[in-house]
Each structure stands twice: as structure tokens, then as C-alpha cells.
Amino acid sequence: MRLVTPSPNTVGPLIVNWPVQKAQARFNELLEESVKKGPQIITMRGVETAVLVPIEEWRRLQRRVRPTLKELLLAPEPRFEGGLPYPRRGRWRMRPPPTFE
């Protein structure tokens, strides 16, 4: 495990890196550290691969990411990729107007 120095953007305590083998062998400790001290990074072959975060922090992050209906409706970009799915007009045949007697 190694401590990561906090950056100006870091909120909360220091994050500890756990190699995957150590995380598997000591999962209970990893879970307790996450709850007590905040997010814990799991590395695989020295590469940061996953993060274990407390559920309260996860829910807070989820709320921040989800846009409100107002934000969706006022967004400058289209809500659908490529615009709205209108049918092509060339395929439709015109019906003759109804005749009244």
C-alpha cells in the first residue's frame, strides 16, 4: 500500500493504493478502510484499475451526474443523436382525397 499525496481537487482524506492480490486477501480491511478513510484504489500490475468508495459518496456522485429535466430541456445540444427520427418522405404514397356524394 502507498499513500497518495492529496491534490488541490481532492476532497477528503488520503487515498491508499491496494494491489489486487492484497485487496483479495484482506478484503474486510479494504472495506473498513474505505468506510473510515474514504476511497481506496485497487491496482493491477501497478496500473490503477478500480476504486472502492463508501455508498454515501457513491450516491452523492450519482446525484451530481444526473441532469434535471429542466437542464435536459434547456440544453443547447440535441437530445437525440442525429436529431429526431422522422420517416423518409419518399416512401409514402399519397391517397386520393375522399369524394363526397
Image (cartoon, grey):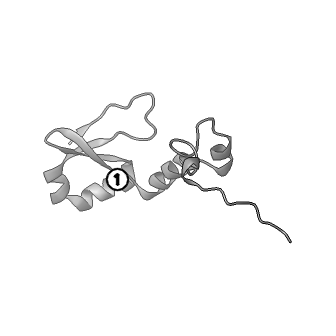
Q: Is residue 77 above or below residue 50?
A: above
User: Disc 1 on helix, strand or loop?
Assistant: helix
In screen coordinates, is 65 left or right of 94? Answer: left
Where residue 4 appears, x then y in whole percent? 29, 34
Where residue 10 appears, x then y in whole percent? 43, 35
Report the number of numbered marks: 1
Residue at the location (43% across, 58% down)?
Answer: 55
Residue at the location (55% across, 51% down)?
Answer: 63
The residue positioned farthest toward the top in the image shown:
8
Quarter residue 100 falls in: bottom right
Q: Check disc 1 and give the amino acid type.
A: Ser
The residue positioned farthest toward the bottom in the image shown:
101
Residue at the location (69% across, 47% down)?
Answer: 70
Quadrant containing the C terminus is bottom right
In screen coordinates, is 24 left or right of 4? Answer: left
Q: In this view, does 70 lie above or below 47?
A: below
Residue carrying label 1: 34
Residue at the location (22% across, 38% down)?
Answer: 2
The residue positioned farthest toward the front in the image shown:
101
Quadrant containing the N terminus is top left
Where residue 47 appears, x then y in whole percent? 20, 38
Where residue 50 appears, x then y in whole percent? 28, 48
Q: Is residue 96 above or below residue 42?
A: below
Residue nearest the observer in this picture, 11 or 60: 60
In screen coordinates, is 87 left or right of 73? Answer: left
Residue nearest the observer in this picture, 81 or 36: 81
